[in-house]
Image (cartoon, rainbow, N blue to C red):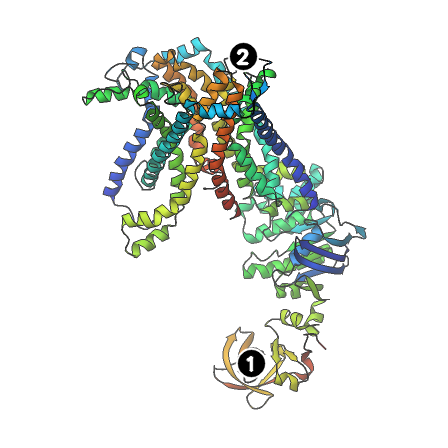
Amino acid sequence: MARAASTRRKAVFTIIGWVAGLAVFFPILWTFLTSFKTEGTAIATPPQFLFFEWTLENYATVQERSNYMRHMTNSIVMSVGSTLIGLLIAIPAAWAMAFAPTRRTKDILMWMLSTKMLPAVGVLVPIYLIFRDWGLLDSLAGLTGVLVMVNLPIIVWMLYTYFREIPGDILEAARMDGASLRNEIIYVLTPMAVPGIASTMLLSIILAWNEAFWTLNLTASEAAPLTAFIAAYSSPEGLFWAKLSAASTLAIAPILILGWFAQRQLVRGLTFGAVK
Amino acid sequence: MATLHTRTSARLMMAPAVILLLAWMIVPLGMTLYFSLLRYNLLMPGMESWTGLDNYTYFLTDPAFSTALANTLLLVAGVLLITVAGGTALAVLLDQPFWGRGIVRLLVIAPFFVMPTVSALVWKNMLMHPVNGLFAWIARTVGLQPVDWLAEVPLFSIIVIVAWQWLPFATLILLTALQSLDEEQKEAAEMDGAGAGSRFIYIVLPHLARAITVVVLIQTIFLLSIFAEILVTTNGGPGVQTTTITYLVYLQALLQFDVGTASAGGIIAVILANIVAIFLIRLIGKNLDT
Amino acid sequence: MGSILLENVSKAFGEAVIIPSIDLDISDGEFVVFVGPSGCGKSTLLRLIAGLEDVSGGRILIDGSDMTGTPPARRRLAMVFQSYALYPHMSVRGNIAFPLKMAGENREVIERKVTDAARVLNLTDYLDRKPGQLSGGQRQRVAIGRAIVREPGAFLFDEPLSNLDAALRVAMRLEISQLHQHLKRTMIYVTHDQVEAMTMADKIVVLNAGKIEQVGSPLELYRSPHNLFVAGFIGSPKMNFVNGIEAEKLGAATVGVRPEHITLSTSDGLWEGEVGVAEHLGSDTFLHIEVKDVGQLTARVGGEFTVRPGDKLFISPDRDRLHRFNEKGAAF
């Protein structure tokens, strides 16, 4: 940009930009504000925006009444666990496809992608029955396994696009230097791929954290992550807006922060490399 | 660039991912297909019997099916319309230099990270509630009758909620595409005498065409499976006004325990999704070669 | 230690045959340069020797034992890549130590060898830097350091100087030659630059379209090229080729004259021509002279030679240094 935008133009866009941004963000902001209100102020008419008595009592009650921390832990175990297992399976696969491609590599990638496009309802019944028969319903292990499968294609794809950017020369140099395949991956490939692996991990955690088909259908109470726990607010506790807001704020805050860090990589991951 | 040795190891390293995904896809899908041909209700165990295509006939002729299909298409089309138009506008806006642009971008992409159940509940209770909701208050303030959104225009309300969730996705991708547009191309058009409007129509939009296609296809895949938002807000109602194919299958399977019909519905959902998936996969495959 | 024998080696990628069949004998301690235009298969040949590609046919013997199917790590070869292929996340020390670490050497041995190599290559002050913080020449030295610490049977160089600027290239050329004299190990060096080949090699292998055109010492190739391709490829500026009636008068289908084997005169000579462009290098002057019925000839004259475009000159090739070729392009 050789020309500086005129200050006036910039000021106009600043106003439009902030209005649009705040409008889109408003429901989140509103939830955040409401979480600090008493139940009374939460439903007050006219709505109280900033000048109300701020209180932390909702955060305390949410935990006391509903075993909130257990659902939080479930969410963490599930999303982080499924991500780590997914990476463990996907790193070797992506390595193979990026550095030893064959004529079928492209087909395999496409096929993996197509499994992601399989609508979940198509396999809901058998998965539900298998889970029921194997005692996996409402278990963290079962749900984690499902999330691994749901996110595996995206993880493989994203890693693949990152690995392809690593020059093959360097891996060959390692081979010439006497590194076994294992050492090549541990000492050379993985450290070089750390940024790519990290963003893949972030995206996978975000997607797993917010997954709301299998978590709602395969859990009841024991293994319910935050998605399912919050859904339980739909009635009749939904009337307790302040508590709902506090629970929601806690549920979305960590992932929102992660997401802000990962915004660039998100595009690549979600479009399977079609847009960078 | 590889030797036989590395190729052999490559095959071994790919095996776990391939086998797992194959199992995840083929086994349950095969079971669904099999169940869809059975009279099979979980409430009547041991009574399974072969019925051929009866389940399909039943599912397809159920009056709820045509409504659900129409609802699904309306939901997908509505959300796409809002997100692509809104996303393009926001992307162009975020491409302009202004104070605090980085922060505004964070604000705009935030809804994407909100879990579906939370956004559905927040919209349902705190914004769309006919008595205490913010929209009702705004309506009363300007002297209008408040609308009971989820009862009077339930499908539209769900479209709005889902569009809000997916707007960041469209914005982010279109913004990325916009930023990859060669600055010199725009400058050349400017030298050629094109005004801001014609530059947008002749240079920017064609450049965005590919990204828009990607947005449309990927969103469609996800939108066909929208579930939590409906479960939490309307439970498919009132009546079947917000029942989509996905939700209908869920009703048949986990509420009526009719495995056979639910499986037939599942297969139909798979076929619907595949129609879109074929286009998407072609597009991405083409991109892989370059 | 490092003799390499290629027997009937061939390589094809699917339908595309890169190397039809090659036999080559490289003795221990020799500095061999593979030279040829891009796409001639020289890099592929090097990678076959390295084990980074499988041969489609034939055998590769290193030190007398068949290594055709042996993975690269166990061939006791070291390679320096065109891109240097340094590990960006490791320090210079880590890069040089990597092969030793892979070989399971103990800490003291690694430290001693890395220090020695760094001293030889003038890298002592840079041991703790990352490759990204080094200049092109320094990166090149790190790549060489990584190769020498392994004490391999032979070194493989894949166009190692092509990413350096001209001055640095000359300096590194000398360093690699000195390294060869110092280590006395077999070195195989791939380049498309005939100057590198001439200045460094004990033995040059000229490749074209996957075939060996000629093998010999630099001066053998210079004095008696077997065919038009080698004659045109070796020597700078390029050999002049004369076809047609003037060539027939000299008794061949094509006659080759090197620019430095031309005598110029203002009074008399075999051919008369008109000066086009004169390139003054100081030590030499290259004249491009347009000769009727012969075409454009390049002549090299020692020192400063004052001439203006358009001047008439008489040209005589040195009779005993003419290269004669038959219709098939073979020398006789």
Which secondary structure, mark 2? loop
Q: Is residue C330 left or right of residue A112?
A: right
Q: Which quarter of the figure has residue C111?
A: top right
> How crowded is the residue under tag 2: few (<14 C-alpha within 10 Å), some, or many (20+)?
few
User: Which residue is farthest left?
Assistant: B143
At 60% across and 88% down in the image, what residue appears? C270
Label 1 Cα neighbours within 10 Å, binned few <14 / some 14-19 / many ≥20: few
Tag on residue C295?
1
The residue lying toward the viewer, choosing from C201 and A210, is A210
Residue bearing the label numbered 2: B43
> For residue C36, which quarter of the picture?
bottom right
- Estimate the spatial distance between the alpha carbons at disc 1 and disc 2, rounded to whole Å: 98 Å
Q: Which amino acid does label 2 sit on?
A: Leu
**Left or right of A60, for residue C172:** right
The residue located at (52%, 23%) in the rendering is B54
* Residue A199 on image: x %, y %: 50, 34
**Tag 1, which chain?**
C
User: Which dot marks residue A245?
Assistant: none
A106 with respect to B144 (left or right): right
Regarding residue A121, the answer to whether it shows in the image is no
Work out whether C284 lies above or below B212.
below
Whether residue A92 is visible: yes
Q: What residue type is labelled 1?
A: Gly
| Residue closer to the observer: C27 or B116 | B116
Determine contact: label 1, label 2, CB under 8 Å: no
Residue C160 % position (x, y): 61, 55
